[in-house]
Image (cartoon, rainbow, N blue to C red):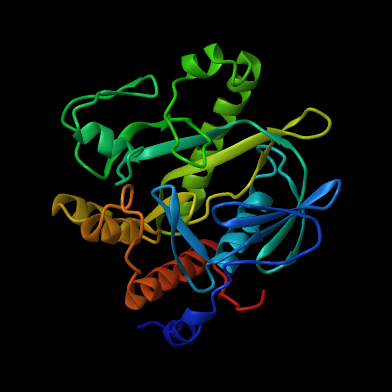
Amino acid sequence: MNKYTVKITQTLDHCITASDFPGKKYVGKVRDVYDQGDNLLLVTTDRLTAFDRYLTSIPFKGIVLNQISAWWFAKTKHIIANHVIAVPAPDALLAKKCKIFPLEFIVRGYITGSTDTSLWTHYAKGMREYCGHQLPEGLIKNQKLSTPLLTPTTKSDVHDEPLSAHEIITQKLMSQKDWDLVSATALRMFTYASEIAAQQGLILVDTKYEFGKDAMGNIIIADELHTPDSSRYWRTASYAQRLAAGEEPDNFDKEIIRLWYKKNCDPYQDKVLLEAPKELRIKVAERYIDLYEALTGREFEWAV
């Protein structure tokens, strides 16, 4: 039990899984997006998704994600402009509209994961080429890669598909010029964020970026940034020992939820899923808040 366990437990049945604000509404996996003319209002809910579907809700998840994104957007403006106009509420962000590229730009510093699109899942099945990258023999799960890899996927409500740079260009999903800028920026962002995380005793394992063009045609970064939903973080102090012992790293993300569902059902095929145990939901909420505090150096506030 940590200092927030009681508060989290009291909120289990009061998670924010839906919102209602003015504007044409689009419901994403986690965010409710409201078209307000020139701008968008992005409300981050407590919904938790994985395996391309909704799984459960996590107390205070929306606030944590929104605040971490806002913190990172402010810290990375020197690398690339972003869509943030204001943060009007703890779980909401006012953003300028942009035309999002139809891809998710995933940068991986380690070989890990449990979903069908994860690098480790493919590698464990014997595949040695992934998104145009050749992988060496002998890698073990959770090992650091010799260099971060950019592994884009399609954006789909059904199932994301990995793509190579060549496929992206030949399928005309991006121009060569746009790809060159975005791919270089994604790797630069990951390197910078990894350095910041390391200063806080954290390993940024992998992350997902979304880029688009604003009304002036400038490429900007959008959606969320380096949150425990879009990224994996591990604790540096225990990483080497756990890796040597074949144990999973001490983490802050929703991987324990993914692993629980894979162990107890088929999250890709079962029409009706089991309900996540309350103690597991509490543990994930604790991890999300712990990450916020470890990363930002700030004490988590219920209403920021």
- Residue at x 54% of width, y 53% of height: 29
Taking 187 as reference, is 72 left or right?
right
Q: Give the residue at the far top of this rendering.
A: 170
Q: How many numbered callouts?
A: 0
Residue 297, picture quadrant: bottom right
Q: Position of residue 195 (x, y in %)?
A: 48, 46
Q: Work out whether 11 lies above or below 248.
A: below
Specify the quadrant that holds the N terminus.
bottom left
Farthest front residue in view: 271
Q: Position of residue 237 (x, y in %)?
A: 30, 59
Q: Quadrant of residue 150?
A: top left
Pinpoint residue 234: horizontal percent, then vertical percent.
36, 55
The residue located at (39%, 61%) in the rendering is 252
Q: Which residue is depicted at the point 72% across and 66% down?
A: 20
Look at the picture and state if 221 lies above or below 66: above
Q: Which residue is situated farthest in the right direction here?
A: 37
Q: Would you say 303 lies left or right of 58 here?
A: right
Quarter of the figure that contains the C terminus: bottom right
Horizontal placement of 180 versus 293: left or right?
right
Q: Is residue 115 above or below residue 123?
A: below
Is any atom of residue 295 visible in this view? Answer: yes
* Residue 198 visible in the snapshot: no
Decide which of 44, 269 is in the foreground and name it: 269
The residue lying toward the viewer, choosing from 222 and 40, is: 40
Rendered location of residue 85, percent (x, y): 79, 52
